[in-house]
Image: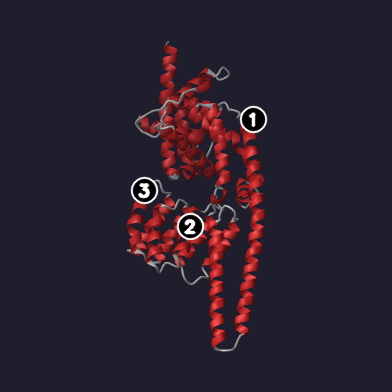
Amino acid sequence: MDDSRMEELVTDYLEGNLSGELKQHVEKKIAKNEEWKLAHDRLGQVYELMEDAEVFLPPASIKSRFDDALMDEIKQQKSSQAKAGHVSWYWMAASIAATIMLTVIVVLTVQNGAQREELSQLQDQIDLNRALVLDALTNSEQSSASSRLVGVNTSRQLTVMDQELEDALFATYLHDENSNVRLAALNALAQFASGSSVRSRLVQSLHEQGDPIVMIQLINVLVRLEEQKAIPGLKKIIEDTDYQQVIRQEAEIGIAKLS
Amino acid sequence: MSEEVLMLAVKNGELEKLSILFERYQTHLYNFFVRLTWDRELSADLTQNVFLRVMKYRSSYREGASFKPWLFQIARNIHADHFRAQKLQLESLDQTLEPTDHGGLMEQEQVSEQEALLNRAIGQLDLQDREILVLSKYQKMKYEQIAETLDITVASVKVKVHRAIKRLKTKYFELEKQQHGR
């Protein structure tokens, strides 16, 4: 047996990777063969030194700085929650108002004048919902994750996507600090992906989205949309080892389904 | 309470639970950085930055993920970010980078002559080898945890550990020979 194989086996033995007959064979070699014993003892010395190495104690200042930072973050969180309480009431009031309007519309039965009024009130409701969605998405620093989530999900009730709304949803999908909100924004965009602008921006975002969970969902969305223009972007992902393996695998599956 | 449960609680808004994770991991992380950089002050800063980043990006922690590999992924990124910012070249298979020994950490009085030699030998390895040895032998992470941290296969971890150990052994006994040859 050559030296390199002997060294490999001794390393595996000291790493605890061996078992059964092979382990017994190596143990016998170490006990009876001078060369094996020397290799084992020399390597064993290095292992022992690492095993018994000094543990460095961190300075007390790390804890005190961390405690300060944690207290600041907790205070900020409480302050955001207080504001979110107001936003939640705002949402409740808005949905109650919308329900009352709908009820009024249903009760009205007189023809022409009533129909005009009905359309006008429906338009008011759509405008209100749109305003609420934009407010939640564009004031993200002052709204909680749950408010932004409600905003994104409400956007799915709108029938038309305008540029301002599209931009707000894309900004949320790419940059929101909460991955659940980003996922919801992606799913909302997918709903409006009949327009070429949304589709091409989704394809472009293959290299802009940093969140692995959202990346995987994006690949699934592009496959569902049968968007062949995503194939070159997916190929680049497969070749780029900076991406996690799970994402590269998803990209491979995506190409297979789109081809 | 497991670290995974604690981190999920932090993710869901119970920020105070992060202090339990801090107590459990500050020494581990500090030692991880010291063994990579040999700089106590820098290591304290980098340790602090890991927890600040955990706090800021707590929403990115996935339910079901192992906490320790996730934490050490953040630690590696912070280490890499710091040196990228300092414009130092770290990762090169052909280069060795001997960290500057700030404060004589490598050869403190209370450390044995052999441990001092070992520290110098580790300092002469390239970053990839140093990192895998620190994670495996000093942080005592299993191959599966290291694989998750480095986003490589378990088989790759085993190969890298073997290579790093072999190189370390060679350097250690070379230094020992030089020392005793004086």
Q: Chain of mark 3?
A: A
Q: Label 1: state its secondary structure.
A: helix
Task: Name the kind of residue labelled 1 in the image.
Answer: Ala
Who comes first in sequence, dot 3 or dot 1? 1
Q: Label 3: state its secondary structure.
A: loop
- Judging by the rendered image, the residue that carries numbered circle 3 is A240
- Judging by the rendered image, the residue that carries numbered circle 1 is A60
Q: Chain of mark 2?
A: A
User: Which corner quadrant holds the N terminus of chain A?
Assistant: top left
Q: Residue at x 41, y 38 (%)?
A: B159
Task: Name the kind of residue labelled 3 in the image.
Answer: Asp
Q: Is residue B35 visible?
A: yes
Who comes first in sequence, dot 1 or dot 2? 1
Labelled pair 3, 1 in contact (Cβ < 8 Å): no
Q: Residues within 10 Å of mark 3 (few under 14, many from 20)?
A: few
Residue A215 appears in which quarter of the rendering?
bottom left
Task: Name the kind of residue labelled 2 in the image.
Answer: Tyr
For the residues labelled 1 and 2, the Cα–Cα distance comes to: 40 Å
Q: Chain of mark 1?
A: A
Q: Nearer the viewer, mark 1 or mark 2?
A: 2
Labelled pair 1, 2 in contact (Cβ < 8 Å): no
Q: Are marks 3 and 1 on the same chain?
A: yes
> Which residue is farthest top?
B182
Q: Residue at x 48, y 26 (%)?
A: A46
State left or right for residue B135 relative to residue A228. Answer: right
- Above or below — where is A108 with respect to B2? below
Residue A106 coordinates in the image, percent (x, y): 60, 83
Who comes first in sequence, dot 3 or dot 2? 2
Residue B88 coordinates in the image, percent (x, y): 41, 31
- Judging by the rendered image, the residue that carries numbered circle 2 is A173
